[in-house]
Amino acid sequence: MQRLRLAEGTPEGLEVWRLALDLDAPVAVDDERLLSQAEWQRAQRLRRHPDVVRAVATRAALRRLLSVHTGIAPEKLMFTHNTFGKPRLKSANGPAFNISHSGHVALIALAPGGAVGVDIERCRSEAELAPLSELVLSPSEQLDHALPFMERWVVKEAVLKALGLGIAEHLQALSVMPAPGPSGTYHLEHSLPISSSLQAWPLSAPSGYAAALGYLDAGCTCYAHGAQGQRDSTTFQEIHHG
C-alpha cells in the first residue's frame, strides 16, 4: 500500500492509501483469514474472480489500517452502521473510513473525526459519457465545461459517500466547480440536506483513472430522513449501464 500525499490545506489527520490489485492472482490466504464470516460470504457471492479479489483484498487492507489506529487485531474488528446505514467501527475511538475500487486500484480513506468519502473510477471518453450528462450534471454544470465529466463524477460520489446519502438520487443536487486560484480544492454548490460545509480535493491517480476525496467536519448534521447508506454502493457503472 502507498500513502498518498494530499493537497495543501487538507485537514490534519486525513489519510488516503492506494492499493494495487493483482486481479489474476488467487485470493490471498492472509487476506481471507482477516475477514468476518459475513464479509467472506458477501465476497463469495460475486460472480467474477477479479471482483472477489478486489473485495477481499480491499477489506483486508482496511482492517489492517484500522488495526494500526485502534490497537485491535484486524480480524477482531467489528463494524456497525449509523442511522443512514453507512458502515463504521463499533469502537467509538476508531477513525471514520471509506473505500473505493475500480479496475486494478483501490483507495482507502481514514479520518480521525467528521465524515470522509473517496472515489476512484476508470476514465471513459467524453463521447461515451455524453448521454449521461442530463442524469448526472446539475443545470449549472451542463453550462460549464471547465472540468471533465469523470472528474466531476468522482467528486460527487466522494462527497455523497461521506454524507452516507444515496448517490443516484442526489447527483444533480451537487455542483462541482473549479475553485478560483491554485487552491487544490473544488468549489461546491448544493441543495443537500446538511448543515455544514462540504470540502473536496482531487487525488493522485494512475494514468486512465480519476479520483477524489470528500470530507465533512465533525459538526455536520444530516437531515435526509430515510436515506439509506446501502445506496453508497451505487457506482458509475450502474449509472452508466442504467
Image: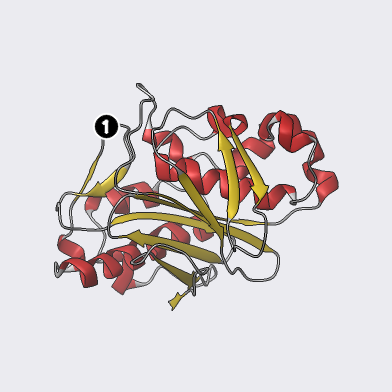
- Identify whether 70 is placed above or below 36: below
Q: Residue furthest right?
A: 127
Q: Decide: few, some or many residues near mark 1? Use Cα within 10 Å; few <14, some 14-19, many ≥20.
A: few
Determine whether, in the image, residue 119 is placed left or right of residue 175: left
The residue shown at (38%, 33%) is 195
**Residue nearer the viewer, 233 or 172:** 172
Is any atom of residue 132 visible in this view? Answer: no
The answer to whether residue 72 of the structure is visible from this angle is yes
Percent x, y of residue 229: 38, 35
Q: The N terminus lies in which quarter of the figure?
A: bottom left
Q: Amino acid at mark 1?
A: Thr
- Residue 120, picture quadrant: bottom right
At 63% from the left and 71% from the top, the residue drawn is: 206
The one of 118 and 220 positioned closer to us in this rendering: 220
Q: Image check: 46 left or right of 154?
A: left
Where is residue 117 shown, x and y percent of the image?
A: 44, 51
Where's the C terminus, which quadrant?
Answer: top right
Specify the farthest residue to the front: 181
- Residue beneath label 1, please? 83
**As displayed, is residue 172 above or below residue 94?**
above
Say which of 185 and 103 sits in front: 185
**Residue at 32% across / 69% down in the picture?**
31
**Frontmost residue, 23 versus 173:** 173
Snapshot quadrant of residue 225: top left
Query: Could you say where residue 30 lies in the image, as x and y percent from the top left?
Result: 29, 74
Judged from this view, the residue extending furthest toward the bottom is: 2
Q: Position of residue 58 (x, y in %)?
A: 40, 62
Residue at position x 47%, y 32% in the image: 166
Coloration of the structure image: secondary structure
